[in-house]
Amino acid sequence: MIERILRPQPGGRHNSNEYRLSGLITGAEPYAKEEIAKRADGQAYRKARASKKGLGLVAVVKP
């Protein structure tokens, strides 16, 4: 899932490693979509709950 890429320099030394996370991203994508759906449901619930309590009817007063 995670691919490490070595970055050699002249003289036999190495820079820090580089990592490709494309496999990790494709593996986590279904979980991310599920989390986004949960957040949207929660936001809709909170909005409905606030309007049910009357909190959604607050008026903005201009000075």
Image (cartoon, grey):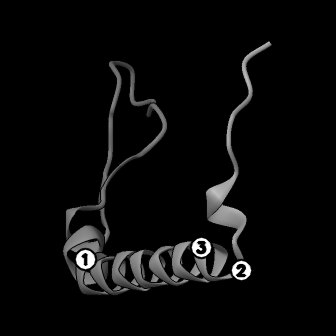
Q: Quadrant of the N terminus?
A: bottom left
Q: Secondary structure at mark 3?
A: helix
Label 1: which residue? 29
Image coordinates for residue 10, horizontal then vertical, percent: 33, 18
**Distance from label 3 to label 2 (Cα)?**
5 Å
Q: Is residue 30 above or below residue 24?
A: below
Quarter-of-image position of residue 12: top left
Q: Amino acid at mark 3?
A: Ser
Q: Residue at x 32, y 46 (%)?
A: 6
Q: Which mark is residue 51?
A: 3
Dot 3 and dot 2 residues touching (CB under 8 Å): yes
| Residue 1, visible in the rendered structure | no
Quarter-of-image position of residue 11: top left
Q: Amino acid at mark 2?
A: Lys
**Distance from label 3 to label 1 (Cα)?**
33 Å
Which of the marked residues, 3 or 1, is nearer the chain's N terminus?
A: 1
**Mark in the foreground, 3 or 1:** 3
Q: Residue at x 54, y 72 (%)?
A: 47
Q: Which mark is residue 53?
A: 2
Dot 1 and dot 2 residues touching (CB under 8 Å): no
Image coordinates for residue 48, horizontal then vertical, percent: 52, 80
Which of the marked residues, 1 or 2, is nearer the chain's N terminus?
A: 1
Give the camera-side residue of 48 and 3. Answer: 48
Image coordinates for residue 4, horizontal then vertical, percent: 32, 59
Image coordinates for residue 16, horizontal then vertical, percent: 49, 38
Image side of residue 6 versus residue 54, left or right: left
Q: Secondary structure at mark 1?
A: helix
How packed is label 2: few (under 14 Cα within 10 Å), some, or many (20 or more)? few
**Distance from label 1 to label 2 (Cα)?**
36 Å
Give the camera-side residue of 14 and 1. Answer: 1
